[in-house]
Image (cartoon, rainbow, N blue to C red):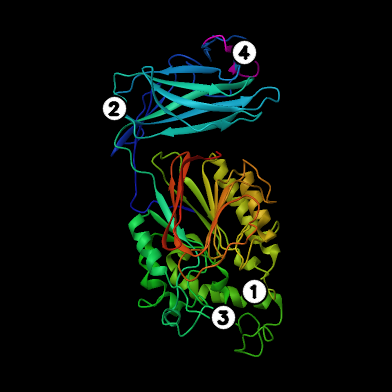
């Protein structure tokens, strides 16, 4: 795992008002971490402390904001709502310089089985500046974050944070803010799709897609990619047709290299089933007689797996050699990386998985669902990667692979072979899952691995719209499908903020599509 920083390095000045310690010299912005001057926990910034029985002791200060609130004390001092719409305001000192961004952090929970949301609003000397997304609370104290950018709060203004609850018996026990002055670096944009590049014969229509010429719109989707100007590019597998050969990948006149390959320096790819459409190193894998690579000669599952994995490495990873070297030196087809945001403390974690080795529909003679399930090398790696990431504090999480868990596409559809991936990722609060394989655009509302609507699940996408050809959407779509469009080509653009994200799919060719939303809150 690495930080995908490239040349996008940001150093910041962090000031703790209680200690005024300088951690790094500023380049573009200065960030101040501020404890409250009035309101809850006014004299301490460490949450989870016990304050005994007093609401005004040395550890915490509790301020009631009208009759709808009361202060209480149990294991923690907290403020809780006595009526729907109850709110509590905490004050902070003024900051030297014009504040351009404020990140607000609260620690909140429900009481006695209550349910409801907490919403954060930001004020400057009593004037409303911004309101965040409602956070669904649970019975365990949890940190929630809102980042408000594009501000212009003068140094003469004090900052206030108001927490409003949607129901009774909701509580919070701490609030603090990170206030940034100066120019704030833009948040990163990632964009991409799957099922991308024709080969030269398909472009000339000497090789067809079924009975018709392939669409070969990868030039149009690449032009769109250039116009998006992403920080990084993702691919969702089946990057080069028909068989993922290196000769086609590297063909600068008719292959992947002629279009999407121009962005190879910022690309983090995933592998698809077409990258496994062949055998290599057959003799070394034990196939007999020497030089024979058929399933008859590679007469065990282990030999076929060895030969197809060697083929993927000899072609896909020969082309994406820098990614293999830096991210996946064993050539497994799975890896992870981090993408920094404008808040240096809240990078996105990105997981890339290999679904092709579990594609029993395409490869019945050697693939196995077990390769994506508990006990497999890939699953164990994913468990460890997520545990290592979470140990540093869970933040926003993105995952992608080729074959989808859910799809309304008529060519392939979804597969339960990837359910355990989904469940494990959801247990860590995954926000977004991207897949390809079916050549259409589809967005799903949050759901769990069984296909049941679940607000704690990810929003997921099938983006098989990279350009090669198109699929159709089933008349009766999969449960929780919010949108499915056939006959379109284009990229999904994601803007990754410290605590939220935006999505935008626009067609580059074919059926016109516009599907976008801003400010989707991260689970963590």
Residue 48: give x, y in percent of width and height.
58, 24
**What separation in Å lies between label 2 and label 3 (alpha carbons)?**
61 Å
Of mark 1 and mark 4, the one earlier in the sequence is 4
Could you say which is closer to the camera, residue 357 or residue 152? 152
* Eye-nearest disc, 1 or 4: 4
Q: What element carries label 1?
A: helix
Could you say which is closer to the camera, residue 119 or residue 154? 119
Question: Is residue 75 a member of the stretch shown in magenta?
Answer: yes
* Eye-nearest disc, 2 or 1: 2
Q: Which residue position is annotated with label 1?
A: 305
Q: Is mark 2 on a helix, strand or loop?
A: loop
Q: Which residue position is annotated with label 3?
A: 280
Residue at 46%, 85% in the rendered image = 206
Q: Is mark 4 on a helix, strand or loop?
A: strand
* Eye-nearest disc, 2 or 3: 2
**What separation in Å lies between label 4 and label 2 (alpha carbons)?**
36 Å
Question: Is residue 122 a member of the stretch shown in magenta?
Answer: no
Residue 447: give x, y in percent of width and height.
64, 47
Q: What element carries label 3?
A: loop
Label at residue 523 = none
Q: Which residue position is annotated with label 2?
A: 98
Residue 375: give x, y in percent of width and height.
70, 58
Q: Is residue 386 above or below residue 79?
A: below
Q: Answer with the quarter of the image where residue 257 lies.
A: bottom left
Of mark 4 and mark 2, the one earlier in the sequence is 4
Of mark 3 and mark 4, the one earlier in the sequence is 4
Residues shaded magenta: 66-80
**How many discs mark residues in the rendered view?**
4
């Amino acid at each position: 795992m690495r930080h995908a920083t490239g040349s996008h390095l940001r150093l910041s000045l962090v000031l703790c008002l209680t200690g005024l310690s300088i951690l790094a010299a500023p380049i573009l912005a200065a960030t101040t971490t501020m404890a409250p001057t009035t309101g809850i926990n006014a004299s301490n910034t460490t949450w989870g402390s016990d304050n005994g029985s007093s609401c005004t002791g040395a550890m915490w200060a509790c301020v009631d904001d009208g009759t709808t609130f009361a202060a209480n004390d149990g294991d923690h001092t907290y403020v809780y709502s006595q009526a729907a719409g109850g709110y509590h305001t905490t004050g902070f000192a003024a900051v030297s310089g014009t504040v351009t961004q404020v990140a607000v952090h609260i620690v909140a929970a429900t009481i006695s089985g209550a349910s409801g949301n907490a919403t954060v609003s930001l004020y400057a000397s009593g004037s409303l500046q911004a309101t965040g997304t409602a956070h669904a609370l649970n019975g365990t104290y949890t940190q929630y974050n809102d980042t408000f950018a594009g501000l212009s709060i003068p140094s003469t203004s004090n900052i206030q944070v108001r927490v409003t609850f949607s129901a009774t018996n909701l509580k919070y026990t701490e609030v603090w803010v990170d206030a940034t002055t100066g120019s704030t670096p833009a948040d990163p944009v990632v964009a991409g799709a799957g099922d991308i590049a024709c080969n030269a014969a398909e472009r000339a229509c000497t090789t067809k897609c079924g009975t018709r010429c392939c669409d070969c719109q990868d030039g149009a989707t690449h032009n769109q990619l250039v116009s998006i100007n992403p920080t990084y590019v993702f691919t969702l597998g089946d990057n080069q047709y028909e068989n993922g050969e290196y000769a086609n990948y590297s063909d600068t006149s008719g292959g992947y290299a002629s279009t999407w390959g121009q962005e190879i320096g910022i690309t983090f790819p995933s592998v698809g089933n077409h990258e496994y459409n062949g055998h290599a190193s057959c003799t070394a894998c034990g196939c007999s007689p020497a030089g024979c690579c058929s399933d008859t000669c590679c007469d065990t599952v282990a030999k076929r797996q060895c030969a197809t994995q060697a083929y993927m490495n000899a072609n896909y990873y020969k082309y994406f050699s820098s990614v293999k070297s830096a991210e996946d030196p064993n050539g497994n087809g799975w890896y992870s990386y981090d993408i920094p945001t404008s808040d240096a403390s809240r990078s996105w974690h990105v997981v890339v998985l290999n679904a092709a080795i579990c594609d029993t529909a395409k490869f019945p003679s050697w693939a196995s669902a077990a390769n994506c399930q508990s006990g497999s090398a890939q699953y164990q790696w994913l468990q460890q990667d997520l545990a290592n990431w979470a140990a540093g504090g869970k933040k926003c999480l993105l995952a992608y692979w080729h074959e989808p868990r859910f799809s309304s596409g008529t060519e392939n559809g979804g597969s339960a072979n990837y359910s355990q991936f989904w469940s494990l990722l959801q247990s860590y609060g995954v926000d977004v899952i991207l897949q390809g394989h079916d050549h259409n655009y589809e967005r799903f509302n949050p759901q769990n691995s069984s296909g049941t609507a679940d607000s704690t699940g990810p929003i997921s996408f099938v983006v098989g719209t990279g350009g090669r050809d198109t699929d159709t959407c089933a008349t009766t779509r999969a449960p929780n499908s919010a949108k499915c469009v056939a006959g379109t080509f284009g990229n999904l653009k994601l803007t990754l903020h410290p605590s939220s994200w935006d999505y935008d799919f626009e067609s580059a060719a074919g059926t016109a599509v516009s599907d976008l939303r801003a400010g989707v809150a991260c689970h963590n």
